[in-house]
Amino acid sequence: TSELPIVSLKFFVSRLWFVVPAYFLCALLFKDPKNINRFVWCYIAGLVIVVFYTIINHASNGFDGDTAHWVMTPFYNDHTAYGAALAIYIILCAAYLFMPNLKRPVKLGVGAVLLLLLVAIVLSYCRASWISLIVALGVLACVLLKIKFKYIAVISVVLIGLFFTFQQQIFDSLSKNDQDASGNIVENIQSMTNISTDASNLERINRWNSAIRMFKERPLVGWGPGTYQFVYAPFQESKNKTIISTNSGDMGNAHSEYIGALAEQGLPGSIIVVAIVVTFMYCGLMTYRRAKNKESKVLVLGATLALLGYYVHGTLNNFLDTDKLAIPVWSCMAIITAIDCFHADKENFYETSETSERQQAPDQK
């Protein structure tokens, strides 16, 4: 049903390159709990190198807000992808501070890395990543206060419903904000809600409106996975175009995991994306509650919040078609799956199945 079958086939194969190793293979590798730590810290080690490179490059340009958009190249294509990766690993790194039996020098090292990543995300000027961390902190507070998942889900649905009910009044209010993104952090925060002059925000709205028009034309099957950037141009309206709009199909996708799926795969595709998010959030929180050892609790909660952080970020950007973010996201899902299946019921997190069999052998004899 795709408008461009070859593009969709290539998109499908490239997604398999991410999902098979980062989810299915990692879920099996994580049967050995030490592999979870190795995987997370190998990625963080590489990310720290990129952070140093970015900060040094940024400093040479006077920490200018405009240069923050590209100083991480060629490792990340722009500051939003860089910020999304930082948000995921800030949450995972923070989780390791609460791992039991960590020696003081190790804990100090984890704290130093966390501080570095926090400095990096501030300097990234990525507003979506800041929002994702705030939401993750809010959900963490709900978890620590032992508020049930169903109540969190109901509150989320109510808030979404209120938004759509009063969207006209909300947009009228937001249209009065004319603060553009800048190198000043306070002004950058204020620009998050600027839909009158901020080109980045306006272009997102342009992409979303185009995607919704595409969806209305093909609501059941969409235009085909991976095709948005090649077919959305005729669906743009001149009144919505910005100084960064293009008809060439060379400036990215729909800037939303959810709306992009709606345009490319129709209503079923968008429902599947939401179902994946809800399923892993529920599974992660339930596994946290039933886990018998603290390591499982810390890691599964960290992976769940990191996943939540990305999918909050995913309302404003779409990066799961890139290796830099598909690997962290699918590996967080693998961590949740592995702990749920292999580790949550153990009294000792680092007890492998082979160790358990050796301990049971004398009793069996």
Image (tube, rainbow, N blue to C red):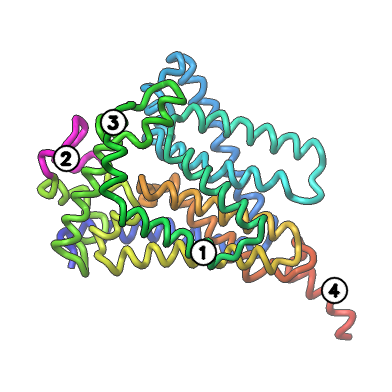
Q: Which residue is mark 2?
A: 240
Foreground: disc 3 or disc 1: 3
Q: Which residue is mark 1?
A: 280
Identify which amino acid the numbered label 2 is placed on. Answer: Asn
Identify which amino acid the numbered label 3 is placed on. Answer: Asp
Q: Where is residue 288 shown, x and y percent of the image?
A: 65, 63
Label annotation for residue 198: 3
Q: Secondary structure at mark 1?
A: helix
Q: Earlier in the sequence, mark 3 or mark 2?
A: 3
Q: Earlier in the sequence, mark 2 or mark 4?
A: 2
99 w.r.t. 8: above or below = above
Most foreground residue, 22 or 261? 261
Q: Where is residue 153 shown, x and y percent of the image?
A: 49, 63
Q: CA distance from mark 2 to mark 4?
A: 67 Å
Q: Which secondary structure class fits the magenta region best?
A: loop
Foreground: disc 2 or disc 1: 2
Decide: few, some or many residues near mark 2? Use Cα within 10 Å; few <14, some 14-19, many ≥20. some
Q: CA distance from mark 4 to mark 3?
A: 63 Å
Foreground: disc 4 or disc 1: 1
Question: Which quadrant does the N terminus fall into?
Answer: bottom left
Q: Secondary structure at mark 2?
A: helix
Label annotation for residue 44: none
Foreground: disc 2 or disc 4: 2
In magenta, the rendered stretch is 237-251
Q: CA distance from mark 3 to mark 2?
A: 13 Å
Q: CA distance from mark 4 to mark 1?
A: 33 Å
Name the residue located 72 percent from the left edge and 71 percent from the top edge. 345
